[in-house]
Amino acid sequence: MTDPSIAVTRLVKRFGEVEAVRGIDFEIMPGTIFGLLGRNGAGKTTTLECCIGLTKPSSGCVRMLGLDPSNPRELARLRPRFGAQLQTTSLPEKARVGEMLELYARYYALRPATAALCERVGLLGKERQPVGGLSGGERQRLALALAIQHDPEIAFLDEPTAGMDAYGRRVLWGEVEHLRRTGKTVILTTHYIEEAERLCDEICIVQQGRIIARDTPARLIAGAGGGSTITVEAEGFAPRNGIARAGRWRHEAPGNGEGARWVLATELDPGPVLAEVVRAVDEQGAQLHALDMRRATLEDAFLNLTGERIAEDAEAGAA
Amino acid sequence: MLLAQTKMNFVWYLFRDGEMMFWALAMPIFFLVLFSFAFGFGNTTQASAFLVPGLIGAQVLTLGFFGVGVMLAQFREQKVLRRIYLTPLPPWVFFAALVLYRLTLLAFQSSILALAGSVFFHVHFTGNVLDMIAMLAIGALTFVSLGTLVGAVTKTAESANNLASVLTVPLAFLSDAYIPLDRFPSTVSAPLHLLPSTQFIDALRGVTTGGEPLAHFSLWIVVLLCWALGGMLLSARIFRWV
Ligand SMILES: Nc1ncnc2c1ncn2[C@@H]1O[C@H](COP(=O)(O)OP(=O)(O)OP(=O)(O)O)[C@@H](O)[C@H]1O
Ligand SMILES: [Mg+2]
């Protein structure tokens, strides 16, 4: 059996009173694209920074390629083997894009291939632009280039597409695909659920410093019901009779304060259910504003998992 | 690698920063002219012979506390250090490149001061050139090392700046840099001679305009090197990259 690229065991990190990570375990096998998904403050960055030796765990341990990143000597041996795009960092404002890429190539003892790299991340023609004059998305793409130009065995990408437009996201997705094809391990954090679903082989959902689910995107979706969601916005409509039993209905106050929005999560074949909903709207004489049907996505799985979790806590508190 | 990194420091923090460039070159001259007249003891040549080494010494303090200490704290606060920390660049190379950049700048500033002193105020540098350079290097080593400590004990650039000011300004005034210590009552000046900055500036003045050999100051040099070593060991232990 091959050894995992990263193994995190009972990781805990406290910042004074705040317990940012409260016991996280995972192993990532080589060649996996691994995603940490969670809301703001869930502990994704803290976990990732523990993995690369920027943060010292309060307890628990991390092994990257069999070495301990919190030990300076072992970290020194790891540095050439991983690359990282951090969430909070900066480069000297007056440095130019080309200079940065060349300097980093030297850090990793590479022959600089600045033009080719700029082409890959869509910075061609920007080589002479100072870092301080780059747009947010361009900075992110430069950070990505600096993280991967030495073809690391493991790439750590902390919210690599935060603030990126569609083009930037495609660039990143392309690079992650490239890393996957060459058998590299990628660990990334994101709150774009669509991105996690599309890119990741495995996903950990992190909530309040703990992992509450870990699986492939397909199995997470299946586990969350795997059904469909039908949203009805109609004045005077309420789920009664037959359609009330089609699945779980949830009542939502619509954003504009008009009418009512009902959301149905159903495991049934959505086609006939939809037809029944339309019939019910008609029979009840309701005025239809909007009707929407979609198959379950990771987003639903995420809401389900994190929502349920909060409900459980509430029940435990009441008992 | 060291040279490439040093060169980038020049390019990023000096050549592409017009204001920095101006102050780096104009500041020493400005001080020289100002103090020569302000403290002019009737004879500005004599005043300058005292002041030029004093100003160079004060530049060395500034270099250590601000040029290295505050700069490191700034790099940390701007989160530049944490990115560098992840690359295989050895930490000492990053540090040495910063020091080398500052030292080269110091060499320039001292030469300008010395030149201005000898051209405009007829200051005679009677000492041996090698002695002068050695003394300057020893002082720079000491204050770079103590400056690193400033960058290591402070969390923010703001507090590093405050600490550096609190150290540099009084030290410069109490260390024989601008005001001759013999103007103080001896009960005050005696303990001031124990300051590393006083010892360094006096030694520097001795070997530059005082015509004394370096060997006269060997005790002080040993003491300065102890400060340097202590500062280095302590900052290596407590310096944080993130
Ligand atoms: N240096 C620190 N000092 C104090 N608290 C911290 C520190 N770093 C993180 N925290 C706290 O730890 C928790 C987790 O933070 P973390 O940055 O890991 O979240 P995250 O999942 O990456 O969130 P985001 O999606 O916003 O990036 C937060 O509540 C945060 O306030
Ligand atoms: Mg984060």
Image: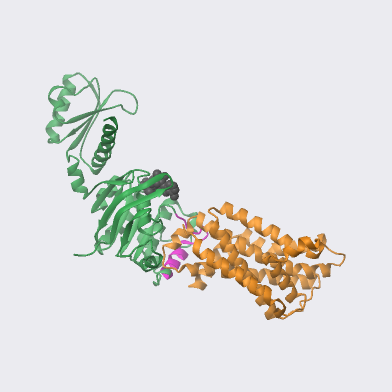
Chain colours: A green, B orange
Between residue A195 and residue A116, name the one nearer to us: A195
Image: A255 above or below B97: above
Residue A119 painted magenta:
no
Q: Is residue A264 visible?
A: yes
Residues drawn in magenta: A89-106
Q: Relative to A248, is B63 on the left or the right? A: right
Which of the 4 image quadrants contains residue A258?
Answer: top left
Identity of the residue drawn at 75% across and 69% down:
B52
Report the label total. Answer: 0
Identity of the residue drawn at 18% across and 19% down:
A284
- Going by the picture, which residue comes out furthest to the front? B187
Between residue A23 and residue A217, name the one nearer to us: A23
Residue A98 painted magenta:
yes
Image location of residue B174, percent across then percent down: 73, 61
Image location of residue B154, percent across then percent down: 55, 55
Which of the 4 image quadrants contains residue A185?
Answer: bottom left
Q: Relative to A28, is A39 on the left or the right? A: right
Which of the 4 image quadrants contains residue A153?
Answer: bottom left
- Going by the picture, which residue comes out furthest to the right? B42
Q: Relative to A222, is B53 on the left or the right? A: right
Q: Relative to A172, is B178 on the left or the right? A: right
Image location of residue B180, percent across then percent down: 79, 65
Between residue A170 and residue A178, name the one nearer to us: A178
Q: Is residue A173 visible?
A: no
Image: A269 above or below B154: above
Image location of residue B142, percent across then percent down: 62, 69
